[in-house]
Image (cartoon, helix red, strand yellow):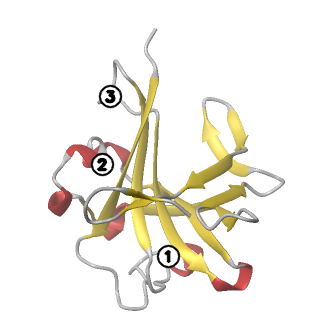
Amino acid sequence: MPDARMTTCTVRFDPPLAENGELENADRSTSAAIASFPGTVFLYQEQALSNQLDKPYRQRLLRISANAEREAVESAGFELTDPKASIGLCSLPEAERAIAPSQLGSYRCSVFLQPVAGSVLTYLGNTPEEGCLSNYRGVVRVFNTISSFSHGHEYLGSRLQR
């Protein structure tokens, strides 16, 4: 039985977004949701069965940014307007991982990750109580819990502990 694989990589927009993060011809909620913040990173993510990696069943773009108001890291999800155009994007060299701004579809939902008490490396977040809207194989709402453990290595390769 094939297993499911999730592939995630950083991407950039080509051409770059306007300095204020707005897209031409985008609806207001999408433009507001992608507004540029210092340190914003965009990730492309696809999920597929291991025997059908060229046919992902889920694709999305995530905007990862600090949210000072909530003292959290926000992971905001967006649809892609033409998902087929991005299949396999993470297998390309980093310099070629670009998405046209026209590929950015509707804003879907945000998860806010907050530091776990007593740890500077672990963040935890959940979808809103009502879930995130979905339209995949009869699923209308998705509920996720995200746990992230960050760690680093010093220049000689030793893992840094906190």
**Disc on res. 53:** 3
N-terminal of the pair, mark 3 or mark 1, is 1
Q: Position of residue 154 (x, y in %)?
A: 33, 65
Q: Position of residue 10 (x, y in %)?
A: 34, 60
Instruction: Identify the residue at image location x=30%, y=48%.
Output: 86
Q: Which residue is mark 2?
A: 86
Q: Circle 2 sits in a helix, a strand or a loop, which is it?
A: helix
Residue 64's place in the image compared with 141, above or below, is: below
How far apart, in angstroms, are the residues tagged by discs 3 and 1? 28 Å
Task: Tell whether label 1 touches label 2 (CB within 8 Å).
Answer: no
Q: Position of residue 137 (x, y in %)?
A: 61, 29
Q: Circle 3 sits in a helix, a strand or a loop, which is it?
A: loop
N-terminal of the pair, mark 2 or mark 1, is 1
How far apart, in angstroms, are the residues tagged by discs 2 and 1? 19 Å
Q: Is residue 99 visible?
A: yes
In this view of the protein, which residue sits in the foreground, 89 or 15? 89
In this view of the protein, which residue sits in the foreground, 40 or 83? 40
Instruction: Identify the residue at image location x=73%, y=79%.
Output: 70
Q: Quadrant of the C terminus?
A: bottom right
Q: Which residue is mark 1?
A: 34
Q: Circle 1 sits in a helix, a strand or a loop, which is it?
A: loop
In this view of the protein, which residue sits in the foreground, 71 or 83? 71
N-terminal of the pair, mark 2 or mark 3, is 3
Residue 154's place in the image compared with 60, above or below, is: below
Q: Which image quadrant for residue 134?
A: top right
Q: Residue furthest top?
A: 1
Task: Left or right? Give the position of 157 relative to 106.
Answer: left
Could you tell me the amino acid type at mark 3?
Answer: Leu
Could you tell me the amino acid type at mark 1?
Answer: Ile
Residue 7's place in the image compared with 36, above or below, is: above
